Image: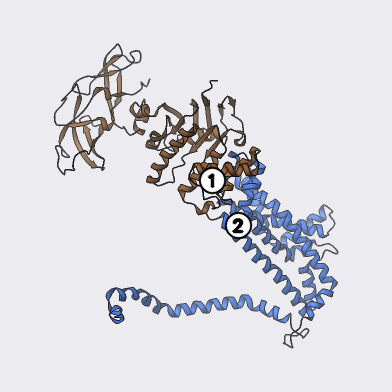
C-alpha cells in the first residue's frame, strides 16, 4: 500500500438484519487529510466511523489503517482515537485524569504521563482546568477536554463523531476554524462525521456525501459543492433547482441541451456517456441564477420565463421563489448589496426571466 | 418617605400575591401539619416506647420504675443472644457479599445484552420478591430435604442469597438505566481492555447502586425471620429467631434492649450508605 494512505475501506458493509446501514463502501483517506463523512441522519456515516474505531464490526469487507488490517481488532488495539458526540468524559475523574486515562497503557512514567496530559490541555487552551470535574465545565470546555484526551494518545487517525453538535451556533463557527487549524498544524488525519454541509465545507479537504448506506459522491469539498453528481447531493448541498431537458447534439466534448430554455445550453460533457435524444437532468445553484426583466440579456446567457411566487428576506440574501410554466419550483439568491427596498423591479405574482450563464449548468450523472 | 413608598403602586403590587396566597390556605396547612404529625406518631411511637422501656428498671411491666443500663449488661452475659447475634452477622455478611456480586453481574447482563430468554430470566429473577415469604420458606425446606442437604447455617445463607440477588439486581439495574455506554467505549478507545474498563469506569460509576443494594440486602437479611425459621439448622439460630423465642415467655426489657441495638445498627448503616452515595454523587452524578 502507498505510504500516503492512512485509512482504506474495502467493500465494507454493515447489516443489521435485513437493513444495510453501510452498503459496500470503498474509499481511501490520505495521510494528513481532513476528511468528512457528510449525510442526513441514518445515512450510515456514524456506523462507518464506528467501524473504523472498532466499535462495530463490518458484516463484510476489510478496513486497513496504515498498512495494517484492523478489521477484527478491538478498539483498544487500534491506532485511532475518537472524540464522541456526547464527549464521554469520565464523570468520576477530574480533567487531568480524564486526559491521562489512556496514557498508563503506554508504558509512560506517571510524571511523563502527567506532562503529556498537560501539554495536550495546553494545545486546546484548557490549561488551568486540570482539577475541575467534567460536571463543572461548559459544553465547549468539555468538547476541548475530549479533544485533548484523544490527542494525548497521539493517534494515527482522529475520529470525530459530530463533536460540535451540542454547541451553539456562534461557538460552533469559532471551533470549526480552530479545529481546522489544529489539524493543519499537527498534520494529523481527521475523519469527521457531520450532517451540516456548511460545517463540512468549512473544514474538509475532501467530503464523502453518504445516502442510504452508500457514498453518493467523494470529491474535494468545493467540487462537491459546485459540481454535485446526483440529485441527492445537489439537494443536500443546497441546490434544489432541477431542470429536465433533452440532448440535442453532442460532439468533441460539447453537448447542447434543448427543450427548456429560449436558446440551447452548451455544456462540457464526455461524449461517450450521452446520445442525442437522451433525456437529461441538470441543476443550477441558487446564487448563480439571476432574475431579470428581459430574456437572454448578455454573453450568451440562457433564460426561462417564470412566475414569482414569494420573496424571503434573509439578511445577507433575498430568496426569490419562482415557478416555471411546466410547474417546477426554483430558488434564486440575490445578494443584498444595496439598501433594502420594499418594492423593487419585481413583485410577487408578477412575471420575470430567470437566467444564468451556461457554464454554471451542472449535469446530473446519467441514471441507466 | 417610607410612607409614600408604601402606597406607591408597584410596592402594593409586589406585596399582593403573598398576602392573597397566605390567607385562604391557612387552615389547609394546619390540617396537613396535623396529618403529618399523626403519621409520624403512628410510625415512631412504638419504637420510642421500645427504646424507652429498654432502660426501665422494672421487669415484665409496662410501668416506668426508674432508669437503668442493667438489661444491656445482662445481654452481654446471655450466651444464647450473643450466639444468635454472631450467627446473624455471619449470615448477613456472607449473604451481602455473595448476593451483591451475583446480583450486580445479573443486572449488568440484563441491562446490556439482548439474549434468548431474556424476558423469562428477568421475570424469574424478580419472582422471589413477589412470592409470599412463607411459600418460599416451605419450598426451600422441601428442596433441602429432597436433595438431602443437612439444615445448618449454610442453608440459611443459601436461602438468603436466593432472595437477596433480586433486590441487588433491581437496585443496580436502576442505576444502569441512565448509564452512557459511550463512556465504556471511550475507555476502550483509550486502550483499556474489557476488564480494565470494568474496574476503572463501569464499577466506579455504578458503585452507589451496588452499595445501596448491598446495604438493603444486609438489613433484609439481618432481620429476616420467616425464611430463617424454616431453614435454620441446629445451632444456627439467628437473632430474630432468638428474639421470637424469648417473646413467647413475655416481652422483657432484655428483648427491648436487643431490639434497640438492632435498630441502632440498621440506622447507622443506612446513614453511612447515604453518606457514601452523596460523596460519589458529587463526582459522578452531576453532569
Q: Residues within 10 Å of mark 2 (few under 14, many from 20)?
A: some
* Quadrant of the image occupied by residue B276: bottom right
Chain of the residue under the numbered disc 2 shown in the image: B
**Chain identifier, blue in the render:** B
Would you name the residue on which mark 2 appears? B280
**Chain identifier, brown in the render:** A
Q: Looking at the picture, how far across and down is residue B110, in whole percent?
A: 62, 47
Answer with left or right where residue A281 lies relative to residue B32. Answer: left
Chain of the residue under the numbered disc 1 shown in the image: A
Q: Looking at the picture, how far across and down is residue B245, in whole percent?
A: 80, 72
* Quadrant of the image occupied by residue B143: bottom right
Q: Looking at the picture, how far across and down is residue A112, in whole percent?
A: 62, 41
Foreground residue, B257 or B194?
Answer: B194
Q: Is residue B174 above or below residue A300?
A: below
Q: Residues within 10 Å of mark 1 (few under 14, many from 20)?
A: many
Helix, strand, or loop for circle 1? loop
Q: Looking at the picture, how far across and down is residue B160, in whole percent?
A: 74, 59
Foreground residue, A165 or A354?
Answer: A165
Helix, strand, or loop for circle 2? helix
Amino acid at each position: 500500500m502507498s505510504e500516503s494512505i492512512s485509512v482504506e475501506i474495502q467493500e465494507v458493509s454493515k447489516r443489521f438484519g435485513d437493513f444495510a446501514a453501510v452498503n459496500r463502501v470503498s474509499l481511501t483517506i490520505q495521510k494528513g487529510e481532513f476528511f468528512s463523512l457528510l449525510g442526513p441522519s441514518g445515512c450510515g456515516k456514524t456506523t462507518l466511523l464506528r467501524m473504523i474505531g472498532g466499535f462495530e464490526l463490518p458484516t463484510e469487507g476489510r478496513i486497513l489503517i496504515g498498512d495494517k488490517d484492523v478489521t477484527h481488532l478491538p478498539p483498544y488495539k487500534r491506532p485511532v482515537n475518537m472524540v464522541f458526540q456526547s464527549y464521554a468524559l469520565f464523570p468520576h475523574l477530574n480533567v487531568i485524569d480524564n486526559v491521562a486515562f489512556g496514557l498508563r497503557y503506554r508504558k509512560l512514567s506517571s510524571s511523563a504521563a502527567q506532562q503529556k496530559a498537560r501539554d495536550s490541555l495546553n494545545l486546546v487552551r484548557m490549561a488551568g482546568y486540570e482539577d475541575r470535574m467534567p460536571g463543572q465545565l461548559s459544553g465547549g470546555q468539555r468538547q476541548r477536554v475530549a479533544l485533548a484526551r484523544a490527542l494525548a494518545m497521539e493517534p494515527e487517525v482522529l475520529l470525530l463523531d459530530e463533536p460540535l453538535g451540542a454547541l451553539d451556533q456562534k461557538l460552533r463557527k469559532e471551533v470549526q476554524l480552530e479545529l481546522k487549524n489544529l489539524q493543519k498544524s499537527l498534520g494529523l488525519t481527521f475523519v469527521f462525521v457531520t450532517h451540516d454541509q456548511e460545517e463540512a465545507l468549512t473544514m474538509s479537504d475532501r467530503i464523502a456525501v453518504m445516502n442510504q448506506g452508500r457514498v453518493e459522491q467523494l470529491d474535494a469539498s468545493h467540487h462537491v459543492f459546485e459540481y454535485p453528481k446526483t440529485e441527492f447531493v445537489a439537494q443536500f448541498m443546497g441546490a434544489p433547482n432541477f431542470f429536465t431537458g433533452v440532448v440535442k447534439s453532442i460532439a468533441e466534448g460539447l453537448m447542447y441541451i434543448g427543450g427548456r430554455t429560449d436558446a440551447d445550453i452548451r455544456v462540457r460533457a464526455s461524449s461517450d456517456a450521452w446520445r442525442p435524444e437522451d433525456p437529461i437532468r441538470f441543476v443550477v445553484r441558487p446564487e448563480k441564477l439571476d432574475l431579470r426583466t428581459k430574456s437572454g440579456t448578455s454573453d450568451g446567457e440562457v433564460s426561462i420565463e417564470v412566475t414569482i411566487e414569494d420573496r424571503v428576506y434573509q439578511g445577507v440574501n433575498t430568496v426569490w421563489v419562482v415557478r416555471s410554466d411546466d410547474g417546477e419550483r426554483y430558488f434564486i439568491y440575490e445578494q443584498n448589496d444595496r439598501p433594502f427596498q420594499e418594492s423593487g423591479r419585481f413583485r410577487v405574482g408578477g412575471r420575470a426571466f430567470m437566467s444564468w450563464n451556461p457554464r454554471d449548468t451542472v449535469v446530473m450523472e446519467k441514471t441507466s | 418617605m417610607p410612607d409614600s413608598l408604601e402606597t406607591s403602586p408597584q410596592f402594593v403590587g409586589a406585596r399582593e400575591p403573598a398576602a392573597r396566597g397566605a390567607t385562604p390556605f391557612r387552615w389547609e396547612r394546619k390540617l396537613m401539619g396535623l396529618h403529618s404529625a399523626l403519621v409520624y406518631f403512628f410510625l415512631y411511637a412504638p419504637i420510642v416506647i421500645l427504646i424507652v422501656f429498654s432502660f426501665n428498671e422494672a421487669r415484665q411491666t409496662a410501668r416506668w420504675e426508674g432508669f437503668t443500663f442493667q438489661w444491656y449488661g445482662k445481654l452481654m452475659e446471655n450466651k444464647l443472644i450473643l450466639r444468635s447475634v454472631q450467627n446473624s452477622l455471619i449470615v448477613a455478611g456472607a449473604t451481602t457479599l455473595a448476593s451483591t456480586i451475583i446480583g450486580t453481574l445479573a443486572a449488568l447482563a440484563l441491562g446490556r445484552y439482548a439474549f434468548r430468554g431474556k424476558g423469562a430470566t428477568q421475570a424469574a429473577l424478580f419472582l422471589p420478591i413477589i412470592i409470599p415469604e412463607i411459600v418460599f420458606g416451605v419450598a426451600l425446606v422441601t428442596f433441602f430435604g429432597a436433595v438431602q442437604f443437612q439444615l445448618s447455617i449454610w442453608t440459611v445463607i443459601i436461602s438468603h442469597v436466593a432472595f437477596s440477588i433480586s433486590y441487588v439486581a433491581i437496585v443496580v439495574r436502576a442505576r444502569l438505566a441512565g448509564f452512557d455506554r459511550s463512556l465504556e467505549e471511550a475507555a476502550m478507545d483509550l486502550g483499556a481492555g474489557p476488564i480494565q474498563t470494568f474496574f476503572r469506569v463501569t464499577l466506579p460509576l455504578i458503585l452507589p447502586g451496588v452499595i445501596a443494594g448491598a446495604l438493603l440486602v444486609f438489613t433484609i437479611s439481618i432481620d429476616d425471620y420467616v425464611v430463617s425459621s424454616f431453614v435454620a439448622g441446629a445451632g444456627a439460630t439467628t437473632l430474630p429467631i432468638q428474639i421470637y423465642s424469648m417473646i413467647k415467655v413475655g416481652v422483657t426489657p432484655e428483648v427491648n434492649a436487643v431490639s434497640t441495638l438492632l435498630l441502632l445498627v440498621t440506622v447507622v448503616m443506612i446513614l453511612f450508605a447515604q453518606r457514601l452515595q452523596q460523596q460519589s454523587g458529587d463526582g459522578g452524578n452531576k453532569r
